[in-house]
Image (tube, rainbow, N blue to C red):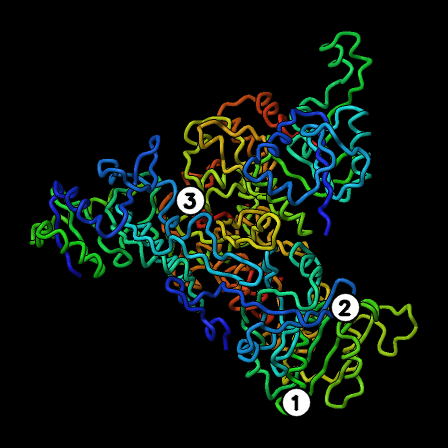
């Protein structure tokens, strides 16, 4: 992999050059929180942010999206507006890039999702290094580093950003800046290693995911699910903010006075009572406890069977977005805890 | 043989769109049972009508334009191509709208989806079909596939039970099978008020008394309401059926049919991709399966 | 095919939902071209008060014998009856204190003469007659009304969100008023569909759309009590738009 470095004071110059590749979006501040937004000026970008309210998935799988327009006689015509818009997401954390890599697999497979694929092709990702806060456990989920899925990735090594060039497009961005980037030497590599070591020690949260699928199977009847079911508000917040929750609902919206209309999808959550409800009235996950169990089970166990790893990347968003304080790390810890057989 | 692959709609941005419904015309609406009509469809485009192939047990996504889309299992056999027969139960918004449609009206179809019955595996063995109530809908495709390729199967037994004769799906067509010698067609009703029913009367499991079944060389395809699974599955296990030779067809909420929308997920399997046909072994290993 | 006949009525309420219909300005002509509005007192002085109706839209809650009689008469002449707005769907603000002694309330407010008034504890429409469709909201969303007309004209029913306000609030990437600012926001238990209009403006949700499809009120209350809210205050807030016991 091509590795270069960019003097920090030249970052704004780089940003101005890179705009020729697409509309620049980056985290901006909103009342002390952060959101990915189109930049009106480079100085609005906040590259030292903790986490954005919504993950970058909103760019690839928008909360609401029209799939088709329908007109009697014409049939279903795909809605393609905006799918080829070139955007550069500047400042994506490793866990979020990792999450996009996971979504890539979900929206590929035997039936690739063309809407997602089109957006993915047109949106560039420039990753940026970060420091963990009290809700981060990406290291435990092995998503604190990524080796693909980005066009460029910047590591903060003090005076420089060390840049990993991930794609040909990333390389074009570097080349477009002329001589802004410099080659790395031994000192830079040592700086990187120091940075990596410091980041590792900064984690405050830790979970063990080895043999977690087995633990989930064994604790399928655990009383913890009932407790969580009593607590959960089914508000869907965790699913909305999760970088790898991809469930969506589809509905037809008919136009006034005709059969014409549009078919649209919107984010859904397995915590909603309707998620597994069929038309005949049978609900395969009626009780709230079974729904929240499904959410944990699918992320931490189901995905392992399907894709070889949990779909949770440890970004901490669900922990900070739950109104009643349901905390995935605590749940896993509790499932792992050895209990006195007599107290079971 | 996937329609979505064969007729990928070409578009500058969306090269192949698995969500693209293809227009199909309703060519026949046949009232089989109250609120259970058989809709016969034919793709508006001739080449689609000819190219469409499915496996018994697969389903399609049916669009009622302006109302919505839903999964429906295909009731016709791939051995009788060119039209699609769908047994649709009137239960919700979309099916209500479908029931208001007439012959020649246009709907949307995409698919086929799901695994279907493992035909290669079943061939060369005995086949037992056991259905209760509306469970006959997905099994009917398998039934006719087997009868149309009769030499590929050994003994074929059908056990089908409904509440009353009037509740029996495909009644006339199945009654015509009773006298055939190449299938043991056993039909029963829980009760017969009409006094005209000439077949069995009694609950579905009682039909086992009239069937000769070798559990080690038979595949059993079971479909029906939960009560059918409860009694038939136990009976099959008691007979000594291996758990992976009992095949079940499951129903789940689906919005995409292609493993994306998440609704039909059970534990870590998607009913739309790895199902809707699951073995009994799958069923007991996945939570909330039945 | 003749246009379906429609009546739009108000029981006890603020008429805000009927106003939303009149405020559909740009769409109003389209709507009127498709339906035959026969009875709409708020908008017209010439009404056919007895004709059979294909669709009746009824706003407000039932607060008197007169309301109840009027509603029954509307039901009798209509094929489809739509409850319009949170008062009609859930009882709304007027139902806030419906458990209290009615006679005492009337006396307190109007004096002795109050006892002679035709006044009864507020009821949602479905507690009095069969309701075919409810469009909640205080007031209703313009788009929901248009979607209802569009669907009903085709013989279908519209779909409205059952998920809570939080879902849309998160989609819009608002800061959580409950978590970040410790405010009494009813988002988690209130039906969405409003695109989290209030939290978007940093105003906590007061629950004006009535309960979401699946609510966990005990956990919601326990969480707020832990934040220091007083139980009485919470009960009052929760009762504001949908009193206890108005199951749909």
Q: Residue at 63%, 54% (x, y): give it.
A: A283
Disc 2/disc 1 C-alpha distance (Å): 29 Å
For the residues carrying marks 2 and 1, which lies nearer the camera in this image? Answer: 2
Q: Are marks 2 and 1 on the same chain?
A: yes
Q: What residue occupies the far top of the structure in this picture?
A: C111
Pick whichever of labels 2 and 1 is earlier in the sequence.
2
Give how far across and how far down residue A73 sits, in percent: 57, 63
Which element type, helix, strand or loop, lies under badge 3? Answer: helix
Q: Are marks 3 and 2 on the same chain?
A: no
* Disc 2 packing (10 Å; few <14; some 14–19; many ≥20): some
Disc 3/disc 2 C-alpha distance (Å): 47 Å
Q: Is residue B271 above or below residue C120?
A: below
Give how far across and how far down residue B91 sits, in percent: 70, 57
Disc 3/disc 1 C-alpha distance (Å): 55 Å
Camera sees residue A338: yes
Q: Is residue B222 above or below residue A11?
A: below
Q: Residue at 52%, 31% (x, y): give it.
A: C223
| Residue at numbered disc 2 | B31
The front one of B101 and A336 is B101
Which element type, helix, strand or loop, lies under badge 1? Answer: helix
| Residue at numbered disc 1 | B150
* Disc 3 packing (10 Å; few <14; some 14–19; many ≥20): many
Q: Residue at 22%, 36% (x, y): give it.
A: A43
Give how far across and how far down residue A161 sits, in percent: 15, 47
Q: Chain of mark 1?
A: B
């Amino acid at each position: 992999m091509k590795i270069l470095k960019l003097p920090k004071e030249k970052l704004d110059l780089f940003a101005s050059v890179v705009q020729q590749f697409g509309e620049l979006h980056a985290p901006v501040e909103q009342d002390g929180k952060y959101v990915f937004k189109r930049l009106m000026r480079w100085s609005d970008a906040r590259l030292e942010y903790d986490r954005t309210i919504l993950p970058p998935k909103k760019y690839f799988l928008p909360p609401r999206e029209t799939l088709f327009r329908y007109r009697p006689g014409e049939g279903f015509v795909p809605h393609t507006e905006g799918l080829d818009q070139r955007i550069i997401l500047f400042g994506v954390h490793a866990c979020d890039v990792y999450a996009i890599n996971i979504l890539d697999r979900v929206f590929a497979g035997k039936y690739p999702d063309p809407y997602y694929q089109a957006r993915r092709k047109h949106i560039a990702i420039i990753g940026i290094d970060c420091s963990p806060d009290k809700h981060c456990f990406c290291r435990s989920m092995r998503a604190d580093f990524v080796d693909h899925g980005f066009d460029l990735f910047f590591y903060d090594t003090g005076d420089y950003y060390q840049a990993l060039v991930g794609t040909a497009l990333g390389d074009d961005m570097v080349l477009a800046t002329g001589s802004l980037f410099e080659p790395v030497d031994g000192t830079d590599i040592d700086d990187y290693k120091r940075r990596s070591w410091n980041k590792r020690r900064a984690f405050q949260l830790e979970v063990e995911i080895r043999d977690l699928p087995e633990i989930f199977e064994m604790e399928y009847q655990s009383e913890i699910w009932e407790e969580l079911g009593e607590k959960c508000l089914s508000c869907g917040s965790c699913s909305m903010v999760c970088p790898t929750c991809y469930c969506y609902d589809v509905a037809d919206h008919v136009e006034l006075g005709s059969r014409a209309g549009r078919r649209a999808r919107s984010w859904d959550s397995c915590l909603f009572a309707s998620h597994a409800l069929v038309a005949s009235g049978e609900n395969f996950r009626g009780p709230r406890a079974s729904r929240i169990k499904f959410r944990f089970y699918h992320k931490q166990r189901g995905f392992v069977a399907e894709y070889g790893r949990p779909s949770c990347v440890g970004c901490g968003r669900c922990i900070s977005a739950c109104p009643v304080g349901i905390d995935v790390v605590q749940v896993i810890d509790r499932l792992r805890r050895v209990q006195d057989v007599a107290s079971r | 043989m996937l329609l979505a692959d064969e007729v990928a709609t070409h578009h500058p941005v969306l090269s192949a769109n698995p969500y693209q419904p293809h227009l199909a015309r309703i060519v026949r609406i046949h009232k089989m049972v109250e609120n259970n009509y058989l809709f016969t469809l034919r793709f508006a485009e001739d080449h689609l009508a000819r190219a469409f192939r499915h496996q018994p047990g697969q389903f399609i996504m049916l669009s009622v334009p302006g109302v919505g889309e839903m999964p429906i299992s295909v009731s016709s056999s791939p051995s009788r191509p060119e039209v699609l027969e769908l047994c649709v139960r009137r239960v919700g918004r979309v099916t209500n709208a479908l029931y208001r449609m007439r012959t020649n009206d246009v709907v949307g179809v995409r698919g086929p989806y799901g695994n279907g019955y493992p035909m290669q595996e079943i061939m060369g063995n005995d086949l037992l079909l056991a259905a209760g109530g509306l469970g006959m809908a997905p099994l009917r495709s398998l039934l006719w596939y087997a009868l149309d390729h009769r030499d590929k199967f050994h003994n074929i037994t059908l056990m089908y039970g409904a509440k009353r004769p009037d509740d029996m799906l495909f009644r006339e067509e199945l009654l015509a099978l009773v006298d055939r010698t190449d299938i043991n067609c056993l039909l029963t009703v829980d009760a017969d008020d009409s006094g005209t029913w000439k077949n069995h009367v009694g609950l579905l499991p009682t039909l086992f008394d009239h069937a000769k079944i070798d559990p080690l060389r038979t595949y059993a395809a079971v479909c029906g309401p939960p009560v059918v699974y409860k009694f038939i599955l136990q009976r099959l296990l008691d007979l000594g059926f291996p758990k992976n030779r009992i095949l079940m067809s499951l129903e789940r909420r689906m919005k995409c049919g292609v493993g994306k929308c998440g609704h039909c997920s059970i534990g870590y399997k998607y009913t739309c991709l790895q199902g809707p046909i699951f073995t009994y072994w799958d069923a007991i290993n996945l939570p909330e399966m039945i | 095919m003749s246009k379906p006949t429609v009546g739009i009525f108000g029981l006890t309420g603020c008429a805000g939902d009927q106003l939303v219909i009149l405020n559909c300005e740009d769409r109003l002509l389209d709507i009127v071209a498709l339906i035959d509005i026969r009875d709409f007192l708020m908008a017209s002085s010439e009404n056919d008060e007895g004709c059979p109706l294909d669709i009746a839209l009824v706003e407000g809650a039932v607060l008197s014998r007169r309301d109840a009689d009027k509603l029954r008469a509307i039901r009798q002449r209509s094929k489809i009856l739509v409850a319009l707005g949170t008062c009609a769907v859930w009882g709304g603000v007027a139902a806030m204190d419906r458990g209290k002694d009615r006679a005492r309330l009337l006396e307190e407010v109007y004096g002795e003469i109050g006892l002679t008034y035709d006044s009864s504890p507020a009821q949602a429409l479905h507690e009095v007659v069969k309701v075919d469709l409810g469009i909640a909201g205080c007031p209703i969303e313009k788009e929901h009304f248009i979607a209802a007309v569009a669907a009903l004209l085709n013989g279908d029913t519209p779909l409205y969100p059952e998920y809570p306000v939080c879902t849309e609030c998160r989609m819009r990437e608002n800061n959580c008023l409950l978590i970040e600012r410790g405010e009494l926001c009813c988002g988690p238990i209130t039906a969405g569909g409003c695109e989290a209009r209030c939290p978007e403006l940093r105003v906590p949700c007061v629950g004006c759309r009535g309960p979401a499809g699946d609510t966990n009120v005990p956990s919601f209350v326990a969480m707020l009590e832990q934040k220091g809210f007083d139980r009485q205050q919470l009960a009052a807030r929760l009762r504001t738009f949908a009193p206890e016991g108005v199951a749909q």
